[in-house]
Image (cartoon, grey):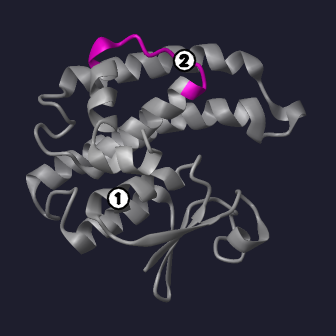
Amino acid sequence: MYEIIGSPTSRAFRVMWMLEELGEPYKVQKEQPRSDAVKALNPSGKIPVFIDGDAVITDSTAIMTYLADKHGALTFPAGTIERAKQDALTHCILDEIDAVLWTAARHTFVLPKEKRVAEIKDPLMWEYARNITRLMEQMEGPYLMGETFTLADIILAHCGSWARAAGFPSDNERFVEYIKACRARPAFQKLTGK
């Protein structure tokens, strides 16, 4: 059985959602970032930490890519043009959406108070909205890769929920509908109980 170490309110949620989509059993050891249990497996103290037998994997996207490849689901096969496009979208989301939200979080509660720059949130909100609009303009179906739901969708939908909780704008109608479609999936519903 797979094990996830981390908090369900963190990026560990992405891995949990992925495992629900795959129908694979797992258990969660609830830990916060930088706890002793986390640092014993990941010196950076970041979560999630994923355990498969004796193997330890860190970083939610690396974990999800591993699981998608291992189970042949929620991804296109390595070496295909579709996989290259999926990977490009995934990296775009990480660079232009996730990183923007993470910067805002760092300057809201992660960094020591004397290192935070409160004024940074306004330009980050503008950048987030612009980047969401560009992503939605590229989308050619109900999901990022058309009709196929992939790990990139899990990451983007998770970012959408994170952004909403952080007070970021969500007035892009196509993005709102996209998030609704992702959250309507049975695996998400099972995980959240909604």
Any part of residue 90 in sight: no
In which quadrant of the rendered image does the N terminus lie? bottom left
Characterize the local packing of mark 1: few (<14), some (14-19) or many (20 or more) Cα atoms within 10 angstroms: some
Nearer to us in this view, 193 or 3: 193
Q: Residue at x 19, y 26 (%)?
A: 138
Amino acid on which the number 2 mark rests in the picture: Met
Residue 169 is one of the magenta-drawn residues: yes
Q: Which numbered disc covers residue 20?
A: 1
Q: Is residue 145 magenta?
A: no
Q: Which mark is residue 52?
A: none
- Amino acid residing under circle 1: Glu
Q: Is residue 90 above or below residue 96?
A: below
Please state which of residues 146 and 17 is positioned toward the viewer in this rendering.
17
Picture coordinates of residue 177, whole percent (x, y): 28, 21
Q: Residues within 10 Å of mark 2 (few under 14, many from 20)?
A: some
Task: Kindly state the secondary structure of the residue where label 2 is placed.
Answer: helix
Gap in Å between the C-alphas at discs 2 and 1?
31 Å
Q: What residue sits 85% from the left and 39% below the top?
A: 112
Residue for badge 2: 125
27 horizontally vs 62: left or right = right
Q: Main secondary structure of the magenta part?
A: loop
User: Residue 160 appears at what percent x and percent y?
Assistant: 44, 30
What segment carries the magenta color?
A: 165-174
* Rendered image quadrant of residue 22: bottom left
Q: Nearer the viewer, residue 127 or 109?
A: 109
Q: Does 108 sit above or below residue 40?
A: above
Q: Is residue 108 above or below residue 64?
A: above
Residue at 73% in and 31% down:
107
Going from N to C along the chain, the mark reached first, 2 or 1, is: 1
For the point 56% across and 61% down, which residue is it? Answer: 48
Q: Secondary structure at mark 1?
A: helix
